[in-house]
Image (spheres, rainbow, N blue to C red):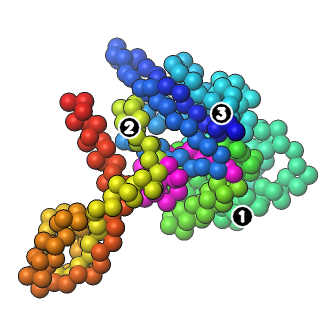
Amino acid sequence: MSAALEFRSVSKTFRAKGKTVQALREVSFSLGEGEVFGFVGPNGAGKSTTIKIMLDVINDYQGEVHLYGRSARDAEARRGVAYVPEAPALYEQFTPLEILRMGLSMYGIRRKDTDAWCMAWLERFSVAVNARRRIRELSKGNVQRVALAHAMVVQPRLLVLDEPLSGLDPVGRKDVVDILNEYKNGGGAIFFTSHVLHDVERIADRFGFINQGELLTVRSPRDLAAERADFHRVRYQAPAAVTSGCVECRVGEFECECAQSELPGLITRLSAAGGHLLEVRPAVSLETVFFRTLEKAASVRS
């Protein structure tokens, strides 16, 4: 079975202000059907370039990119691909219902129940009440919901999402995460970028860290848990913090991360300060591993 998406030693350089910029350096990874791949990196790391290459917006690169076994340069390979950018540019004079109808038409999909089908997806994203309002009248969060419904209405094989939860409130974020999980469980593949590492942990089966055009590592939650097994999140009550790096969650209640070897010393200081321990749990933090990966890469380059 072919991978939904495959990058093989992809490199891309740009000329900017008389200088050569290496946007991607020998990037290789694959995404299987029914899998979610989170792509994480700071601004300018190469995330947008990667998306533009898989969508053939950029086609002068070195290496190979395949969608379900066909070259990404082949328009037919992208027939089952839907893309939602970070800031969707929907036609402001149209309504959400009209936007979804256009999506079906653009993909050459004809249905006898077009309006009912479109309304069902608007309802699924909790925006059906605005189905006949102009896009320009909607909030940023509702526009994001319409854009996601527009992607899903065509029943794509591969979803490419750039910051899919941007602009959504907590309820909207949960709704979208539930829909994406349902889509994945049905065999759909998802490639998405996000600056919110907690979202990546919640959604992704694997995640890749990219920085300065180089894919530093690809991990799974299981890999992450194994790497962080000797670290703990500690929550305690005390008149003041008893160690550096603690965050005061509420008045007199603190939380911090510490290594297994540091735990006895922290408990001793806590007892001496008249405080008491509330909770100790494993510290499985994508954010911590991400920054340590960046630091390690920086030290290697220097």
- How many residues crowd around disc 2 within 10 Å: few (fewer than 14), some, or many (20 or more)? some
Q: Which residue is mark 3?
A: 67
Q: Which of 254 and 302 lies nearest the eye of the viewer? A: 302
Asked whether the viewer can see residue 38, the reply is yes
Instruction: Based on the picture, tell me whether residue 136 belongs to the magenta stretch.
Output: no
Q: Which mark is residue 216?
A: 2
Q: Residue at x 33, y 51 (%)?
A: 289
Q: Quick one: SS at disc 1? A: helix
Stretch in magenta: 187-206
Query: Which residue reaches farthest left?
Result: 272
Q: CA distance from mark 2 to mark 3?
A: 23 Å
**Residue denoted by label 1:** 123
Residue in the foreground of this view, choosing between 146 and 300: 300
Farthest-out residue, right = 112
Q: Position of residue 261 (x, y in %)?
A: 18, 65
Judged from the image, the secondary structure of the residue bearing numbered disc 2 is strand
Q: Is residue 300 left or right of residue 207?
A: left
How dense is the environment of label 1, judged by Cα within 10 Å: few (below 14), some, or many (20 and up)? some
What kind of residue is marked 3?
Leu
* Residue 163 point in image, percent of width and height: 50, 48
